Structures are given as structure tokens and as C-alpha cells.
Image (cartoon, rainbow, N blue to C red):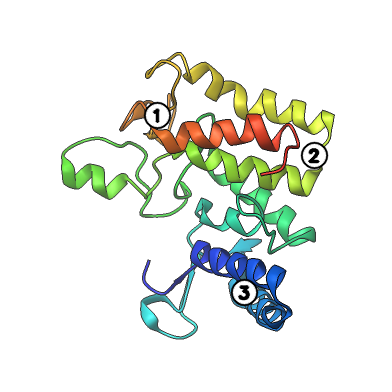
Amino acid sequence: RIGKPVEIQSLWINALWIGASFSKAWKPHLKHAQDSFLARFWNDDTGCLYDVVDCDHEPAKTDAAIRPNQIFSVGGLPYQIIDGEKANSIVDVVELMLLTPLGPRSLSPENQQYKPIYSGGVVERDGAYHQGTVWPWLIGPFVEAWLRVHGNNKANIKHVNDQFLYPLEAHLEDVGLGHISEIADAESPHTPRGCPFQAWSLGEYLRLTEVVLRGKKK
């Protein structure tokens, strides 16, 4: 992913937003970056964001792979970069193409590089790690984005708990007792893989249940 990956730009724009909250001098830079981000990353053909622009350091070369990294433009970070219909479309695409009971896949099954199972030797496992393998910790940014576009109300919180969090709650008693695994296979039965006691997976689950869904300040 050589070039300008979508999540790095989301982090950069959030840094500018933090700077602008302390000094007005950063506000023009924030607006310029946000306008440029939307103009450069939006892909009309897929209804979501390019994964990388200026690929391989070639101007205007884009990678249209559908990955969960784009969700950080809507949720998972303090500042929501994209809102309105485009934000709704991003969340819908990620939910439709990537979401599994244990979290989002790292790549759409429609991509030729998609790997459904994390298995084999080191080379085979490394080749699947970011090419379809499920990352449970990304349920945090996804759910926060989903609530931002659909509304953080009682009905939607119930939907989130029933549809997105219930499988993870069951997983707490499945592999590492009281914990959530590092990764899982992209296809059913979504066998847990990697570390069974993964701090970032459990951390995002706790952020959702204890902060986002309870409306507490971060």
C-alpha cells in the first residue's frame, strides 16, 4: 500500500482538527485537507473511498480495493471527516462487503487478492493477514461510524447490541476466556486465529460498551 493510504490521511486530518481546536491558525489547513481528501478519495463507482491514492508514488494512480480502513473517515476517531449521504454509503458498503460476526474483513471477497482462510506456513499466513482475515478490533470504529450515520438512540443501540456485539460477547467464552482473539478466518465458521488474548480487540469492545454505547465522554 505504497502511496497515500486512506486511514493515514484520516489520522492527519484529525491531527489538524486537534490543532485547530487550540489555534485558529490551523483552521484553513484543516479545511483545505478535508476538501482535498473528499475530492481525491471518493470513488463514485463503488460508493465509498479509494484505499490508496497516488499509488506507488504515481500521481492520480488509485487503488479501489474495498478495505475497512476507510471507516476511520466516519468513526473510530474524534473528528468525523465525512458526513451526509457519502458517510452513509461508506458505512453501508463496509457492512455489506466486509462485516462478519467477529468484525470486518480486511479485504472484500470480490478482490482477486482475497484470502478466505488464515492457515499454512509463515509465508501463507503472512499473505492472508491483511487480505481478507477478520480483525475484531475494527468493530469499534465500524459501530461508532454506524451510530454516527444512523443516530445514537435507544433503538439503534439495541440493534447494535443484537446484530454486532452479541457474537463477540459469545466469543468471550470461546477461546481465551474473557478475551477476544487477534484475528479470525474471513469465511464461516470464522475460526479464531492468532493470539487468543488480544488487548486491542478487547480494548475496542470495552470502548464500545463502556463509552460509545453509554454516551460517556472519551
Give the percent coordinates (x, y) of residue 65: 48, 60
Callouts 2 and 1 close, C-beta under 8 Å: no
**Is 12 placed left or right of 58 in the picture?**
right
Density class for disc 3 (Cα within 10 Å; few <14, some 14-19, many ≥20) is: many
Q: Quadrant of residue 193?
A: top left
| Residue under label 2 | 152
Q: Nearer the viewer, residue 9 or 89?
A: 9
Q: Residue at x 37, y 49 (%)?
A: 131
Helix or strand or loop: what does disc 1 sit on?
loop
| Residue under label 3 | 37
Helix or strand or loop: what does disc 2 sit on?
loop
Give the percent coordinates (x, y) of residue 114: 38, 49
Q: Residue at x 71, y 78 (%)?
A: 27
Give the percent coordinates (x, y) of residue 30: 67, 76
Q: Residue at x 66, y 68 (%)?
A: 17
Distance, label 2 to label 1, CA atoms, is 27 Å
| Residue under label 1 | 181
